[in-house]
Image: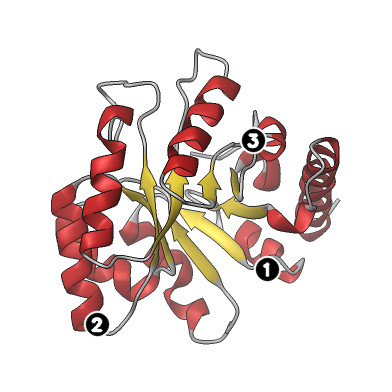
Amino acid sequence: MSIEAEIARRLDGVQARITGAAARAGRDPDDVCLVAISKTQPDQRIAAALTAGHRVFGENRVQEAWAHWANRRTVIDDLELHLVGPLQTNKVRDAVALFDVIQTLDRPRLAVKLAKEFDRAGRQLRCFIQVNTGEEPQKAGVLPVGADDLIAECRRLELPVEGLMCIPPADEPAPPHFALLGEIASRNGLAGLSMGMSADFESAAELGASHVRVGTGVFGPREV
């Protein structure tokens, strides 16, 4: 099987599983956006996903994303690029120049830096606030107890926050974390929920995800 055929088959399979999960929850499958996580993927596999018609991708690192996407942005008008990895303040200018969505806004200092760069660049990127639902010390994200205050600060800065994002602990069931994220979003009037990866995106879709982030499910095991 060619790489093009393999990636097309994988994309169709993931979309079918999203459709099934949404149907089980009485949701419209079109309300769940598949973000294909292309970090560390070889160029040929990314090209195959584009050939298959997919246009929404996520990257973890700003520098790697530039290598994958800078040239493609000039020829593919309908790309939508999401930053799903931690964002350092010294990378904000490069991130705002390349991405369409920042999913990892997690602290007031970063919010201030983004607001200033949005004004300077004349670009307003959609934002998700990352919540560390498992309260893991090694993981990025605002703690649940601080989420309301960070959301309020982002609104004060007039940042276009449309939802929340989480990465549950690998050794715990994901649904309780998805439910917690939904509770925080609901009480703050946020509709977007970026949650669920290759191992648990169906559960996320059933529990209200607006975006699921799938890497190996789309591209296969990473080579590095």
Q: Amino acid at mark 2?
A: Ala
Question: Where is residue 87 shown, x and y percent of the image?
Answer: 27, 51
Which label's residue is closer to the chain start, 2 or 3? 2
Asked which quadrant contains residue 54, the reply is bottom right
Q: Is residue 153 left or right of residue 222?
A: left
Residue 170 position (above or below residue 107): above
Q: Could you say where residue 96 lies in the image, as x and y percent from the top left? A: 31, 70
Between label 2 and label 1, give the one nearer the viewer.
2
Residue drawn at x 47%, y 70% is 69
Residue 39 percent coordinates (x, y): 48, 50
Say what amino acid the circle numbered 1 marks: Leu
Q: Are marks 1 and 3 in contact (CB under 8 Å)?
A: no
> Which numbered mark, 2 or 3, is in the foreground of this view?
3
The image quarter in which residue 94 lies:
bottom left
Q: Which residue is mark 3?
A: 204
Q: CA distance from mark 2 to mark 3?
A: 34 Å
Which image quadrant for residue 207?
top right
Give the CA separation, mark 2 to mark 1: 28 Å
Percent of width and height locating residue 60: 40, 49
Determine the residue positioned at 57% across, 84% down.
Answer: 77
Task: Count residues near mark 2 (Cα–Cα under 10 Å), then give few for <14, some for 14-19, many for 20+.
Answer: few
Residues at discs 2 and 3 in contact (Cβ within 8 Å): no
Q: Report the side of 217 relative to 27 (left or right).
A: left
Local packing at callout 1 (Cα closer than 10 Å; few below 14, some 14-19, many 20+) is some
The numbered dot on residue 50 is: 1
Q: What kind of element bears circle 3?
A: helix
Name above or below for residue 159 compared with residue 186: below
Label 2 residue SS: helix
Name the front one of labels 1 and 3.
3
Q: Which residue is mark 2?
A: 121
